[in-house]
Image (cartoon, grey):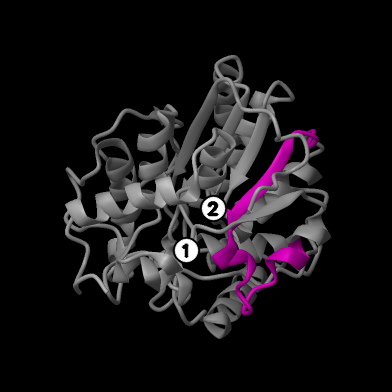
Amino acid sequence: MDSFLPGHNDVPENPLFVCVLSNTETAYIEGLSAAGKSAKLTDYTPAGDAELLETGNIISVPVLPMTPPFNTPTPGLTTRAVLDTTGVPHVFVRAGMKITPEVPMMDLEVPAGADIRNKIAVDDPQTVFKRAEEVGKKLKDKSDFIVIGESIPGGTTTAQAVLNALGYDGKVSSSASVNPMGLKAQVVKQALESSDITHGKLRQNPLEAVRCVGDPMMPAVAGLVSGIGCGAHVILAGGTQMAAVFSIIKHMGIDTDNLSIVTTSYVANDETANFRDLAKQIGVNMFAQDLGFGKSKLVGLQQYEKGYVKEGVGAGGAFYMGRLLGYSCQEMTAQVEKICIELAYLLDDYE
């Protein structure tokens, strides 16, 4: 675990963590997302993740973001632990949320995404992109190393649809231990048919793919990357969702030389998905960060090793950044456990 991506051997001088918060009504489809206790409660997940990341607790949302069983903690707590340990500052970008969290945000003032089975999933992705691009321009002079994470329930399904529209064969991961591959395939098929999109049809028009079958997080992150430009190393912290974002950026003709993807080993090793192969297809440098939760004394964290949750809120990229800054996985995991205990996530005693 001493290796890093090419060009990442130097310690960042001014690292920054950015989290894009969004919703898509695609998450309302029962059985599609496990990022909440019920499909409708996924509305609260990005808001809850933001409040946990900012304060260590929830303020305005009714439930803690977690995945049953065993109260598997949101990966947002992992990112919170890393930021606590390292002191790295963070910024929230609101890109279409249903619920407003009580945290400071840079608001793009755009609506949440619709169900991708509708004809239009994102009303005006060009506006989302342009507004995020302006935010990126403001951030680029503040940091030499920027990690961009996301929180959007249902985002792996929209990612699969966009990847298909761009001509890539992406089998996406899931926040559930049993990946609902059949349901996702059915939803994606209906979405593509409703917009008359065949495989690869929109490769030269990626924002149109977003408009038809994507979500607002995608053009928001693409806009941030465009605005940041080549002045900083940028990590897209996430799995297949960030693979879809990278594909959009690539086919928009935006420079990707300083852009990489870091995800967790739980995503990269998911046998129901094909993340490593997908990374090769789209031509991106990627790194799979092991969080080491299998050695944790907490039952909730052990569930990550069994396929629950896997990634989100930039957890893998945050851990990777912490390692670049000289912190060990053991130090960061210990802080994750401390936060989990404080929030009484455990249903069982220590082993």
Mark in front: 1 vs 2: 1
Region rendered in magenta: 255-278
Q: Few, some or many C-alpha atoms within 10 Å of disc 2 (few <14, some 14-19, many ≥20)?
A: many
Q: Position of residue 222 (x, y in %)?
A: 64, 39
- Mark seen at residue 154: 1
Q: Disc 1 versus disc 2: distance between alpha carbons?
A: 9 Å
- Residue 135 appearing in the image: yes
Q: Position of residue 228 (x, y in %)?
A: 65, 25
- Mark seen at residue 215: 2
Q: Nearer the viewer, residue 28 or 293?
A: 293
Q: Nearer the viewer, residue 173 or 120?
A: 173
Does residue 330 sit above or below 257 in this rendering? Answer: below
Secondary structure beneath dot 2 equals loop
Whether pointer 1 and pointer 2 mark residues with C-beta atoms closer than 8 Å, the reply is yes
**Residue located at (58% from left, 31% from top):** 146
**Residue located at (43% from left, 60% from top):** 153
- Residue 112 appearing in the image: no
Locate residue 79: give its quadrant: top left
Does residue 73 sit above or below 308 in this rendering? Answer: above
Q: Position of residue 317 (x, y in %)?
A: 55, 46
Locate residue 304: give its quadrant: bottom left
